[in-house]
Image (cartoon, rainbow, N blue to C red):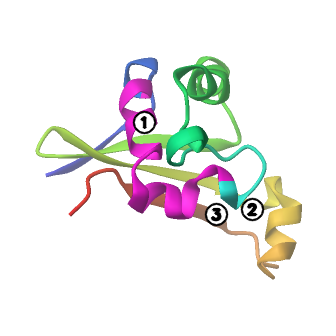
């Protein structure tokens, strides 16, 4: 069974490990743009960076809604959704003119 739970502070150590996994940082890592976290070696996301980015979001909310994906009760990835209207620059960059949600996800476990 697939289930979702809102990203919580207790998920941050696991999220950090995932962000520093090659198949995740290839798409989500610090090289993709400002504010992105994760990578290898000196680019690896630190506990402090993950807390600084995600802690306030967990505590106070955000225009981006993040959830941990679970399969059979075990965490397997992260999914987030947002209204593109809240990110006009990004919507323009991807030539999205309709009012629809955006979503991104990654599997935290490697094959």
Q: Which residue is mark 3?
A: 101
Kindly indicate whether the residue at mark 3 contacts the one at mark 2 (C-beta within 8 angstroms): yes
Q: Name the foreground residue: 107 vs 18.
A: 18
Q: Name the foreground residue: 45 vs 10.
A: 45
The answer to whether residue 104 shows anywhere in this view is no
Q: Which residue is mark 2?
A: 84
Which callout, 1 or 2, points at the residue further toward the start of the chain? 1
The residue shown at (81%, 65%) is 90
The answer to whether residue 43 shows anywhere in this view is yes
Measured as percent of width and height from the top left, residue 48 is found at: 60, 19
Label 1 vs label 2: CA separation?
A: 24 Å
Asked whether residue 101 is drawn in magenta, I would say: no
Measured as percent of width and height from the top left, residue 92 is found at: 86, 74
Front position among marks 1 and 2: 1
Span shown in magenta? 12-30
Label 2 vs label 3: CA separation?
A: 6 Å
Residue 15: which disc? Answer: 1
* 79 lies above or below 55: below
The residue shown at (57%, 56%) is 28
* 56 lies above or below 63: above
């Amino acid at each position: 069974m697939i289930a979702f739970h809102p990203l919580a502070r207790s998920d941050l150590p696991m999220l950090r490990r995932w962000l520093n996994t090659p198949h995740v940082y290839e798409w989500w890592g610090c090289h993709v743009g400002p504010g992105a976290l994760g990578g290898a070696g000196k680019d690896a996301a630190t506990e402090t960076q993950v807390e600084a980015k995600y802690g306030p979001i967990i505590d106070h909310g955000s225009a981006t809604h993040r959830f941990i994906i679970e399969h059979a009760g075990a965490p397997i990835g992260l999914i987030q959704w947002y209204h593109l209207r809240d990110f006009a620059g990004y919507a323009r960059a991807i030539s999205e003119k309709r009012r629809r949600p955006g979503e991104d996800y990654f599997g935290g476990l490697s094959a």
